[in-house]
Amino acid sequence: MRNLLVTGGAGFIGCNFVELLLERYPDYRVIVFDKLTYAGRPENLARFRGDARFTFVRGDICDTEAVRSTFREHQIDTLVSFAAETHVDRSIMAPDAFIRTDVFGTYVLLEAMREYQLERGLFVSTDEVYGHIEPGHSSVEDDPMKPRSPYAASKAGAEHLIYAYHITYGLPVLVTRGTNNIGPYQYPEKAVPLFVTNAIDDIPLPLYGDGRQMRDYQYVMDHCEGIDVALHHGAVGEAYNIGSGVETENIVMAHAILDLLGKPHSLIRPVADRPGHDRRYSVRTDKIRALGWQPRHDFAAALERTVRWYAANEAWWRPIKSGEYREFYRQQYQSRLGQA
Ligand code: NAD
Ligand code: DAU
């Protein structure tokens, strides 16, 4: 393992993972391949620019020639793939890009892996592939996939292809299934950074439905460390859940954000629910823990670090919230909130 291609490295988890790789592995070369969609931010990579081990290539994982030439020119031996359309609400509004990138793009990467005989490929998936989980159960990796949103279905479709390529062609691939990440550089369409940045500006926090949906909010670096452990020690053909094991209701998360910022709870605004909203996700993480991983942040610590980062890094998120984001926000929230 020496020349690693990190697709989607300009996004939230990807850029945190690049940071981890460059810190931990002095001998690795890291080539980020990213289309720079609205979620891919060149500024997320600015801190790596002076590092000779880091290279950025702008490209689309659906573009077979761009992928092949990057594999060839950089003598890629290992793939870690984050590139995806990732926001559930956008997948409900416009599923097309999700099917294209998350399913077809994965197929293009698998074909390139086959052609250039990579040593290993890790594809970052999600606990959303399991669908809504009834109380009393926590998903294990052998549970059936029952995705319920276009996003989750596209990720599950990708996973089926990955497994099929392992069985059919013997490709050395594996997947991780992470729970909700929070932390630095998350695009403020996702609930936590949306709520934090709205609260800083004294704007209502749009809480879907009754706010009693449960998520396992884990710190992004804990997730990245789990991906690292799976990449180096996981078995090919396998899937690994990664999560904190702590479930938190969204309404509790919203109150905690407001408390950390010293803002009034009256900023919480219950709004129309997300169609098909999965009420609960919950995973068991025995399998990744058996490889030596454990999270280093509990929910309170993860949320506090996240809130502090957004409070200290307005220069990162303010330009985002004044760009493409405004139109997205209008479409997504105008009728819900009864305002622009
Ligand atoms: P993100 O939306 O912040 O970033 C996605 C990145 O992929 C961006 O840099 C974007 O430009 C890039 N990208 C999108 N389409 C592309 C294409 N066609 N070609 C090349 N690059 C493309 O996403 P994230 O939250 O960092 O998620 C990263 C991965 O982790 C995704 O695969 C996602 O499904 C998975 N995941 C996310 C979470 C979470 O809570 N955010 C949890 C579990 C799993
Ligand atoms: O579980 C892992 C998944 O977590 C990842 O695979 C996805 O890429 C990531 O987006 C995330 O999906 P969620 O749909 O759980 O995340 P989101 O931040 O959009 O929503 C978190 C919860 O908050 C969810 O129950 C919906 C709710 N919510 C969300 C938004 C955007 C609100 O109540 N109001 C909102 O405005």
Image (cartoon, helix red, strand yellow):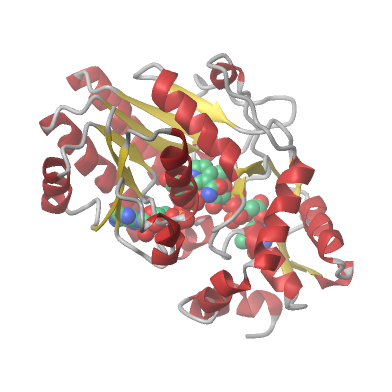
Point out the residue furthest to the bottom here: 340
Along the line of sight, the residue nearer the viewer: 289 or 309 = 309
User: Hey, which quadrant is residue 256 in on the image?
Assistant: bottom right
Is any atom of residue 8 visible in this view? yes
Q: Residue at x 63, y 23 (%)?
A: 284
Q: Give percent across and percent down for residue 181.
A: 59, 46
Q: Give percent across and percent down for residue 125.
A: 44, 38
Q: Is residue 327 shown above or below 332?
A: below
Q: Is residue 122 shown above or below 293?
A: below
Along the line of sight, the residue nearer the viewer: 96 or 4 = 4
Q: Is residue 296 shown above or below 269?
A: above
Q: Give percent across and percent down for residue 203.
A: 74, 77
Q: Is residue 186 left or right of residue 153?
A: right
Q: Give percent across and percent down for residue 273.
A: 67, 61
Is any atom of residue 131 visible in this view? no
Q: Residue at x 63, y 78 (%)?
A: 335
Q: Quadrant of the N terminus?
A: top left
Along the line of sight, the residue nearer the viewer: 191 or 314 = 314
What is the total number of numbered labels drawn onto the structure image?
A: 0
Q: Is residue 239 left or right of residue 127?
A: left
Q: Is residue 301 left or right of residue 315?
A: right
Q: Is residue 197 left or right of residue 235?
A: right
User: Hey, which quadrant is residue 28 in on the image?
Assistant: top left
User: Hey, which quadrant is residue 157 in on the image?
Assistant: top left
Q: Residue at x 36, y 64 (%)?
A: 37
Q: Residue at x 55, y 58 (%)?
A: 186
Q: Quadrant of the C terminus?
A: bottom right
